[in-house]
């Protein structure tokens, strides 16, 4: 049994035209960019700014967003080359299948399943909190039976509602996403413009508070793995605080890579995938940096609210109506984040099922809507149950480590495919290979080390469970293993000899 068998790029592309498994190509570069903005602008801009500024970095949180953005940009350049060269659903799963082999493809697919499912459920839980708060402001208290300790039917309800929307087709999802994204970007711009009138230069001093200085509030954050092994100073603020905060706010950027899962549904993926991935990341980074500078300019960093930094900043200057508007923007923002995470999850599930690493019954595409309805409904129900019943706060950190791991695999894959398949047509080429992929790997791994030891342990447990499932099912039912490669190089030996298919 060859667990390192790779799936030729030609075969992956050929599979996209199979009857019963063909997704509709309906997305443009603008749709992809809006998808990226829709999934990236969410809880991070409305919540994480407070913790990162008040506990870790002070006003220098703006630099933390830049650091996280640069780390993402390195990965985005690698994703752009892959997604335009191999325009197939599945994102990092499909890319690793073409370069590292089946067992690595399974590992990254299993990783993405966890990342997207937990991410969607966590965002749904956050959505329900904003919904309950807005309902309370309107004089409505949600019944204990639907929104209480240990159960959250509000979160489950919004997940199921979005599942229904996604089942209607990618075009419908794109139109709804565009409307909601327009609303939340307008609210973010309102925050930036209105906040500028209340910025005080004195609030930026010191821009980088001294390490271990007083002023941090809230519970002391759990030490990172780097701090545990003595390679990073403990305590908030200082230069180290900028990088620790970067690992925290990195959660705010998660999602641009999900644009790559829509490659198979894009009209001209060779041209539009790079535009969508890089364009959405650039827009979001600028907005994040601007918002963080405004909020720390309005309120001294040691007084920034950890739970609702933007809303409390405007309440503190006597503009409560803007605070209410921010809550509406957060609700809209989280809605699109959920929807796109769910789309990404269903496409990875679909791609793995089409390769028969998961039951092939889930690879069926609806003739009416052109979407994988079975995988969409299945993942929607699972996310709804998770959002309703599971305590997600600690588990949510697995989303960060899972995404960073995917970034590392994709960066390595770019270097491998350049060497093994130089004949492939690449409409977008990652610049300075192998330097940019190497920097992407190093940046992503460094951010992984800034996560807690407990997160690493949970990640390894999930990976071990995944390998067990692969051994018991995937390796025995794999389409590539039972049918063999139909096109291109069929083994590592062929590829290493320089023969291309």
Image (tube, helix red, strand yellow):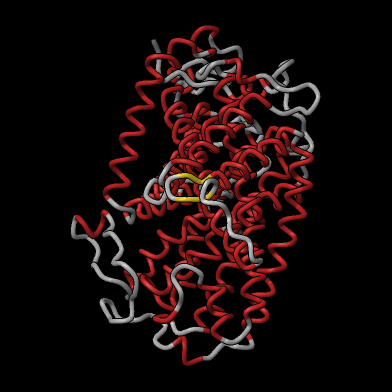
The quadrant of the image that shows the N terminus is top left
How many numbered marks does the figure carry?
A: 0
- Residue 432: in sight, yes or no? no
Residue, x 52% and y 58% (percent of image)? 252
Q: Quadrant of residue 237?
A: bottom left
Q: Is residue 381 above or below residue 60?
A: above
The percent position of residue 171, horizontal first and vertical second, equals 79, 39
Q: Image check: 226 left or right of 251?
A: left
Residue, x 45% and y 17% (percent of image)? 474
The percent position of residue 411, horizontal first and vertical second, equals 47, 43
Q: Residue furthest top?
A: 482
The quadrant of the image that shows the C terminus is top right
Residue, x 55% and y 46% (percent of image)? 146
Q: Image check: 322 left or right of 391?
A: right
Name the one closer to the observer, 449 or 47. 47
- Residue 464: in sight, yes or no? yes
Q: Quadrant of residue 86?
A: top right
The percent position of residue 60, horizontal first and vertical second, equals 43, 76
Q: Is residue 467 above or below residue 462?
A: above
The percent position of residue 229, horizontal first and vertical second, equals 19, 55
Name the one closer to the observer, 166 or 28. 166
Q: Image check: 96 left or right of 262?
A: left
Name the one closer to the observer, 434 or 382. 382
Residue, x 60% and y 39% (percent of image)? 342
Name the one closer to the observer, 326 or 191. 326
């Amino acid at each position: 049994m060859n667990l390192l068998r790779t799936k030729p790029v030609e075969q992956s592309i050929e599979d996209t035209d199979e009857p019963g498994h063909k997704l509709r190509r309906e997305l443009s570069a603008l749709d992809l960019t809006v998808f990226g903005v829709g999934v990236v602008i969410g809880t991070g801009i409305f919540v994480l700014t407070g913790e990162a500024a008040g506990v870790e970095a002070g006003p220098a949180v703006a630099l933390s967003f830049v650091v996280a953005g640069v780390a993402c940009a390195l990965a985005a350049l690698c994703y752009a080359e892959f997604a335009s060269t191999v325009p197939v659903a599945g994102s990092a799963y499909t890319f690793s299948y073409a370069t590292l082999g089946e067992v690595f493809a399974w590992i990254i697919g299993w990783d993405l399943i966890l990342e997207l499912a937990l991410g969607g459920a966590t965002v749904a839980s956050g959505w329900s909190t904003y919904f309950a708060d807005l309902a309370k402001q309107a004089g409505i208290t949600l019944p204990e039976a639907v929104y209480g300790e240990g159960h959250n039917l509000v979160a489950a309800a919004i997940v199921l509602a979005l599942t229904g929307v996604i089942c209607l087709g990618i075009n419908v999802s794109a139109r709804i996403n565009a409307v909601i994204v327009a609303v939340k970007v307008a609210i973010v711009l309102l925050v930036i413009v209105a906040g500028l009138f209340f910025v005080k230069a004195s609030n930026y001093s010191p821009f980088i508070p001294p390490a271990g200085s007083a002023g941090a509030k809230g519970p002391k954050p759990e030490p990172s793995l780097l701090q545990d092994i003595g390679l990073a100073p403990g305590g908030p603020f200082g230069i180290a605080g900028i990088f620790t905060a970067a690992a925290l706010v990195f959660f705010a950027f998660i999602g641009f890579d999900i644009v790559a899962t829509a490659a198979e549904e894009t009209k001209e993926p060779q041209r539009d995938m790079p535009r969508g991935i890089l364009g959405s990341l650039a827009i979001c980074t600028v907005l994040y940096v601007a918002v963080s500078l405004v909020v720390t300019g309005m309120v001294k960093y040691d007084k920034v609210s950890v739970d609702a930094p933007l809303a409390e900043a405007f309440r503190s200057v006597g503009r409560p109506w803007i605070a209410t508007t921010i809550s509406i923007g957060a609700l809209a923002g989280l809605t699109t984040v959920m929807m796109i995470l769910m789309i990404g999850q269903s496409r990875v599930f679909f791609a793995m099922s089409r390769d028969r690493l998961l039951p092939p019954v889930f690879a069926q595409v609806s003739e009416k809507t052109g979407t994988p309805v079975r995988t969409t409904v299945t993942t929607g129900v699972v996310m709804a149950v998770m959002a309703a019943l599971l305590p997600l706060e600690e588990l949510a950190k697995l989303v960060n480590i899972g995404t960073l791991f995917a970034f590392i695999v994709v960066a390595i894959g770019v270097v491998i495919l350049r060497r093994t398949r130089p004949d492939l047509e690449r409409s977008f080429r990652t610049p300075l290979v192998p330097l940019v992929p190497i920097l992407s790997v190093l940046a992503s791994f460094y951010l992984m080390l800034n996560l807690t030891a407990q997160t690493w342990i949970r990640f390894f447990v999930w990976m071990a469970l995944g390998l067990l499932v692969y051994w018991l099912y995937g390796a025995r039912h794999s389409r590539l293993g039972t049918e063999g490669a139909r096109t291109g190089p069929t083994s590592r030996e062929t590829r290493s000899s320089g023969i291309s298919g």
